[in-house]
Image (tube, helix red, strand yellow):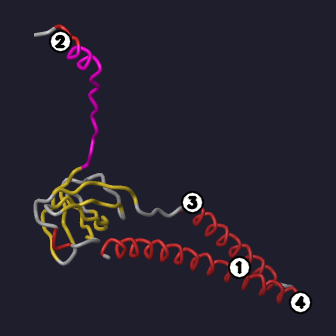
Amino acid sequence: MPSSLVENLKKEIEGFKKEIKAEKIGHILEVGDGIAKISGLGGVGSQEMLEFNTEDGSVSGIAFNLEEDTVGAIILGDYLKVKEGDKVYQGQVLATLNQASALANLTSAQGTLAQAKANYDKILTGAKTEDIKISEDSLLSAEQDLTNQYLGGKTILSNAYAKIYSCGKEEVK
């Protein structure tokens, strides 16, 4: 064996870097009508993207029904390509809601409503007609603010679902 070949092999061995990459891989237990039941993806989150590895390529999906041992997922692409036993790879979270901000706004609105009710009750026990009208208006305003916070939360959730839905339609095209 020539010494240059040995030297080249030694350099390659010395420069070898072993890379280990952990991937969450599951397997399809059942599939039908665009829905898959998957085992082996215990750490997957709700609304997290999944990649179904089929014989004809990959198909995207979204995890929705998280159970103790299985995950129910919606298949976004051509679900007829997806078969029992196919591998499923955990992807990225598609959407998350910032609950801290929404909860703070809701709590503030509830506090304002409670204060307005307390002021209203206090005035009813011995106040002038003008004071009662001011407190009634304040109470109505606080109730409207609380309703608006609830509706705002519903709008945020609706927009998140619309994004998820549109993501699936783009892949089907």
Circles 3 and 1, Cβ within 8 Å, touching? The answer is no
Sooner in the amino-acid sequence: mark 2 or mark 1: 2
Q: Tell me whether circle 3 and circle 4 mark residues in contact (CB < 8 Å).
A: no
Q: As drawn, is 148 to the left or to the right of 60?
A: right
Of residues 169 and 68, which is closer to you in this image?
Answer: 169
Residue under circle 2?
Answer: 6
Left or right of 43, for residue 163:
right
Residue 80 x/y as whole percent: 16, 73
Q: Disc 4 and disc 1: Cα gap in Å?
A: 18 Å
Mark 2 → mark 1, Cα distance in angstroms: 82 Å
Residue 157: percent from left, percent from top: 48, 73
Which badge, 3 or 4, comes first in the chain's sequence?
3
In x, y percent, where is residue 5?
A: 18, 14
Give the residue at mark 1. Answer: 142
Name the amino acid, label 1: Ala
SS at mark 2 in the image? helix
Q: Residue at x 23, y 18 (%)?
A: 13
Near mark 1 (Cα within 10 A), the count class, few <14, some 14-19 or many ≥20, is many
Magenta residues (range): 8-24
Q: Foreground mark, 3 or 4?
A: 3
Question: What's the distance in space between the residues labelled 3 and 4, CA to CA?
Answer: 39 Å
The vertical placement of 14 against 168, above or below, is above
The amino acid pointed to by label 2 is: Val
* Percent coordinates x, y for residue 106 in the rendering: 61, 70
Q: In this view, does 136 lie to the left or right of 103?
A: right
Give the camera-side residue of 145 and 1.
Answer: 1
